[in-house]
Image (cartoon, rainbow, N blue to C red):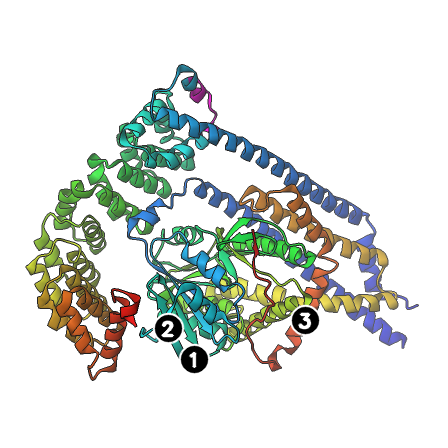
Amino acid sequence: MVRPHPLVQHVHVSLLGGGWEVVLLLGMLGAAAVLVILLFGLNLVHRRRADRDLRLEAKVADLLALWATRRASPAELAWLERLGEADRRVLFSCCLRTLPALSDAARTRVRGVLRDAGLLDREVRGLRHRDWARRADACRILGGIGHGAAVPALIERLKDPNEMVRQHAIAALGDLGAAQALGAIVESLDASAGWGNLLAIMALSRMGSRSVPAVGALLAASTSAATIKALLQVTAQIGSAADPALIRALARHEDAEVRIEAVRTLGSLAPDPEAVDVCLAAMDDQAWPARALAARSLGALGDARAIPRLERAMGDPAYWVRHRAGEALARLSDAGRAALDRALGDANPFVRDMAAQVLFMTAPSPEAAT
Amino acid sequence: MSALLVRLSEEFVLFSLLITVYFLAINTIYLVLLLLSFRAVRRRLRAIRFEDFRHIRESGLAPPISILVPAYNEEKSIVESVRALLTLQYPKLEVVVVNDGSSDATLERLIREFGLRRTPRVYWQRIKCKPVRGIYWSPEYPQLWVLDKANGRKADATNAGLNLASAPYVSVIDADTVLEGNAVLAMMNAILPRPGETVAAGGTVRIVNGCQVANGKVLKVGLPKSPLATAQALEYLRAFLFGRVGWSELRALMIVSGAFGVFRTDALIGVGGFRSDTVGEDIDAIVRMHAMLRDARRPYRVVFVPDPVCWTECPETFKGLRSQRERWQRGLGETLEHNRGMIGNPRYGRIGALALPYYMLFEYLAPLVEIAGLVILPFGWAIGLVNWHFFLLFFTASFVYGLCLSLGSLVLEEISFRRYREPGQLLRLLGAAVLETFLFRPLNVWWRLVALLTWRGRPQTWQALPRKGFQTA
């Protein structure tokens, strides 16, 4: 047996001398035991909760079916008033799932029950809760249930310090079709980016033709390329513009992103010979996405004047311009398809390949495709 | 002789101290990741509570996404997987299956099941790949494309799919996986708040063995019968729920799993797609994205979203598992080698200074340290340097600590996504946590060590895991 080096002896003595190792091990075992108890305890609570929620959901589904046809009884109202926070979440989840499938009259009746029970007022108060998650949830519920009286409170939330709350407020106002919120939502287009911006666009789009004048006015006044782009997207979604001439002018904007969005929008508006001219001019744009979207819009506008230019675009160096030009030709009735047939014999293999692809993809039946 | 032994004993003490420091460091990192994960998951749960995918579904403004499915000899599960993909809830979705020169009936099964026809489709070849033999499409499933190409391994197949993809986002998933219905919606919902910045996002991968699958959907979540696969179910839970979440929270996420990830198409093409000369193409692509965007000083983020789930088949045999682990080890080694200039380089932020050194020291070299410890300990005992008391303490402490980490991830799962709801399932996972130290972990360490020492001279191949196919209802 070798006598250990003094350093080894020192390490062993200091490591094993104080009995701390027992404490450490017991501590770790204790932590493991606590975690096991926590795991199974939580599992038990969650399973009970899930069972309870299932029963509650079934009861709420039955009640919603009744409230769609009649007013709530005093006993039912009393039950609703007694619901705790977690049960109210279950109730509203059921409502949000069920309401879209109901008729307008039935939805109004169900809303009336929830209002009579004081639940909607409680949610309006929830819009000022100190917890942002509670505020965002209140926005979602009020928008989904369609509680029009909440519009002023929801407009206030557009200035909420929390981004999620602002986004849910925009979405809720869109759900409610709140024309009085148009200005505030349009303003939020400037302030928000990404998802918030998308939600604002969607909210405005949902308001349909009601938002056309406000969007048009702002489009005329805006100088920010990002805002103009967003407003053009709204216009394209609605399919109607307050001033089509402005959209045509924007197709010549100095910012490529704006031009791209404008030519895309022209394709979603009512067919207009002047729009065709603008799109034909955009086929010479330096930015290939603008050329590609101009080709798509020409297909949507359905004017046969575009055929020669689209035929030339089948030889464009950019893949997506060739692709969109081919698709546009396929939409332009027999003359367009004849152009595609001619392209099959083109000297340029890119033109031939794209023509073959488009003819295959747009064939009226699989048999015709082969 | 005595002088030699004294000298050896000095070396031994130094080595023991190094092992102890290594042990403390790795476990501290795990603890930090676990705590960060609790915070991140709690925040995510609050957001999920009122998440409303209706806006993406109905808007018409949701960006399109192309799902790329590289497939090699996947005849057993490919049809089920594709069916599941075609029913995914997302408004603008195309599925691009790439048959990478399979020697089985993968292509024939797809053609038969989906009524595919060869098309004259042309596409923009932005990344070079092996020759394409044909592109198939069916008017019945207009969003499905099948590309048949010469064999070139997974990265090459994914690049071919990337060329064909027409959407600004691509999701790369394995052919033997089943995505949950709202997985893409949930992923895009996490990307869309910052669409300009988010270049890649990873979702959670779980083990499908033992689950009941029908029509490409997981009907009932179960655990595999095999203890080896159950240990992997626990391992995946740990890796995704606290590993990836923790690294994402540190803004140093280096892995977006090849089994399920979403990428911005332009960012992926910007780095030249996936490298064909590595088997760790997923991790390598993310590291190169970090490098490219850091070099360009562009704001960006790579995120992990824990709630979208993809179910994948894990190997149930030792042979299959060994092959998989050797590939993972090799993939990590190749990535570290290809990107060695970034390791410890503060210019690459937390990726260079934190994540890459971690993966090198505590993942890639870990088998070497662990095996060295196992070899040295008997030696120390033989020459009287190891007190059995000390050995027992060390072993028990590392065992209980590992158990606590596994329990922590099980608790995290219980308070968050609760896919394993039955107490019996939790009990089995708990059993796996106890037993893995004695069987799964030593084997895993050994296979990784062998791969670490031998991968340089060996050819790269597709991961040929024996597939059982899904358990149907």
Q: Give residue A271's quadrant in the image.
A: bottom left
Q: Is residue B427 left or right of residue B71?
A: right
Q: Residue at x 17, y 60 (%)?
A: A300
Which stretch is magenta?
Answer: A78-88
Numbered disc 1: secondary structure: loop
Q: Which of marks 3 and 1 is nearer the N terminus?
A: 1
Residue lying furthest bottom in this view? A347
Q: Residue at x 16, y 50 (%)?
A: A222
**Marks 1 and 2: in contact by CB < 8 Å?**
no
The residue that label 1 is drawn on is: B130
Q: Are marks 3 and 1 on the same chain?
A: yes
Which mark identifies residue B135? 2
Q: In the figure, B283 relative to A114: above or below?
A: below
Around disc 1, counting alpha carbons within 10 Å, would you say few (fewer than 14), some (14 to 19), or many (20 or more)?
some
Image position, residue A246 (x, y; %) = 10, 54
Measure the C-alpha gap from mark 2 to mark 1. 14 Å
- Pinpoint the chain carrying mark 3: B
Q: Which of marks 3 and 2 is nearer the N terminus?
A: 2
Front label number (3 vs 1): 1
Q: Residue at x 23, y 35 (%)?
A: A178
Return the x and y of residue B273 as percentages of the image width and height.
42, 72
Secondary structure, mark 2, is: strand
Magenta span: predominant SS is helix
**Outermost left residue:** A274
